[in-house]
Amino acid sequence: MSSSTTGRADELRDLLRRYGHAYHVLDEPEVADAEYDRLFDELVELERDLTASARSSTWRRWARSTR
């Protein structure tokens, strides 16, 4: 896997974590829902190419939804 793919995935995880905190904790959204969804979808695609990891945002979301 290329380091640029891994780097972009890390960047997206950080952004989505920040945006989620701003939205859910601070009640001050930084981006529109459609932009968040686009970034999330991009991360899903990248993670399909990366080894699954416990720090994966999409993996955690999936794990919560299957409980």
Image (tube, rainbow, N blue to C red):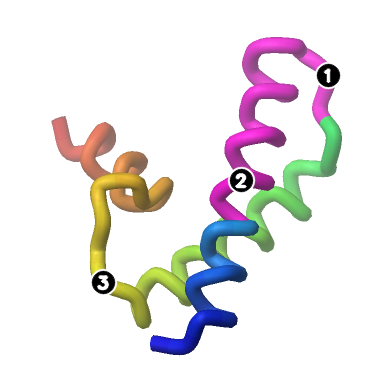
* In the image, residue 47 above or below residue 22: below
User: Residue reaching furthest left?
Assistant: 67
Residue situated in front as seen by the camera: 42 or 51: 51
Question: Mark 1 or mark 3, which is nearer the start of the sequence?
Answer: 1
Circle number at residue 28:
1
Question: Mark 2 or mark 1, which is nearer the start of the sequence?
Answer: 2
Q: Which residues are magenta?
A: 12-29
Question: Mark 2 or mark 3, which is nearer the start of the sequence?
Answer: 2
Circle number at residue 51:
3
At numbered mark 1, what does the secondary structure look like: helix, strand or loop? loop
At numbered mark 2, what does the secondary structure look like: helix, strand or loop? helix
Label 3 to label 1, Cα distance in Å?
Answer: 33 Å
At numbered mark 3, what does the secondary structure look like: helix, strand or loop? loop
Label 1 to label 2, Cα distance in Å?
Answer: 17 Å
Residue type beneath disc 2: Asp
CB contact under 8 Å: marks 3 and 2: no
Q: Decide: few, some or many residues near mark 2? Use Cα within 10 Å; few <14, some 14-19, many ≥20.
A: few
User: Does residue 9 appear left or right of residue 35 in this picture?
Assistant: left
Question: The N terminus is located in which quarter?
Answer: bottom left
CB contact under 8 Å: marks 1 and 2: no
Q: Which residue is mark 2?
A: 14
